[in-house]
Amino acid sequence: MKITIVYDNYILNEYKGLKSSMGFSCFIQTQSNNLLFDTGWDGDMLLTNMKLLGIDYQDTDIIFISHNHGDHEGGLARYLTLNPNPKIFVPKSFYKNLLNRLGPQQTELRKKVYAVEKSVQICRNIFSTGEIEGIFIPKEENQKILIKEQSLIIKSRKGVIVIVGCGHSGIGNILNSANDIGKVYALIGGFHDFQEYELLNTLTINMLNDFSGFLKFAALKSSGKGGIPLIVPTHCTRHRKEIFSLFPNNSEKGGVGYELVIDENEI
Ligand SMILES: [Zn+2]
Ligand SMILES: [Zn+2]
């Protein structure tokens, strides 16, 4: 299985002519399915990056949209004009809006859109956390806006890989939901304003349902040891530097061109 970041605020491999821009998307290739997670803002940039990374956009079975923000679903319309074949899984809160955008004539395309509310299996070894409500505070405004977001959970023998769009749902809530499927191996994507770093420690995650101040303190002290084996904070993550310095051995820089390969025997 291979996960490739194809759209991001950062670039990992400058030499290939890849472009970066505000937004996020990654392509997940497994033995049974190819899934596009989000589409970034600009569909053409997404398609160019995919091509440069050797990914054929026609070879997509599923599109998974994390939430109704332009930097995650902006490229969807362009993508669908070139490849209208994939099934599309969107949060229920985005479903009507998307159907309206597609328009009444697009009958075949409309049939392929699925509204996700609760945690659900998307395809073999791949799940959605379901919609989790969170808060979004736009830079220019002070008011808090409620937004629902779904995250992706991939089962592997190494543990569960969690892919997050913007992290509006709260990383703690997302990890808690992922923990229902299995022990978390990797956390990849946008963590937004996330600062509860102790949650990245496995001990704390396992105790989330039965949380006490003492356990939280113990987990903080042992952070770095026994934590999530792979943390890739990218896209909108505001406190990337803090995460890299707190978890120097188990965090990696994301960006367009980032690849995580897991042996199929480990899936
Ligand atoms: Zn975002
Ligand atoms: Zn967002």
Image (tube, helix red, strand yellow):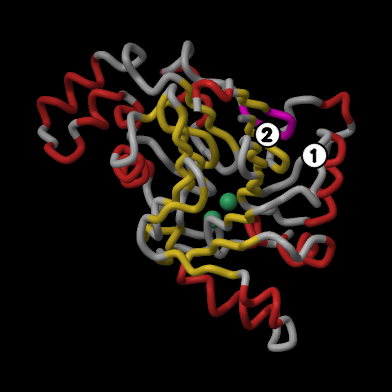
The magenta region covers: 254-258
Residue 105: where, in percent of width, then height? Answer: 74, 87
Residue 8 vs residue 89, the one in the foreground: 89
Q: Which mark is residue 55?
A: 1
Q: Quadrant of residue 71?
A: bottom right
Residue shown at 33% from the left, 29% from the top:
183
- Kind of residue indicated by mark 2: Thr
Residue 209 vs residue 200, the one in the foreground: 209
Compared across the picture, whether 100 is left or right of 226 comes to right
Helix, strand or loop at label 2? It is strand
What predominant SS class does the magenta segment belong to? loop
- For disc 2, the marked residue is 4
Residue 19: where, in percent of width, then height? Answer: 82, 39
| Label pair 2/1, CB-CB below 8 angstroms | yes
- Kind of residue indicated by mark 1: Ile
Q: Quadrant of residue 116?
A: bottom left
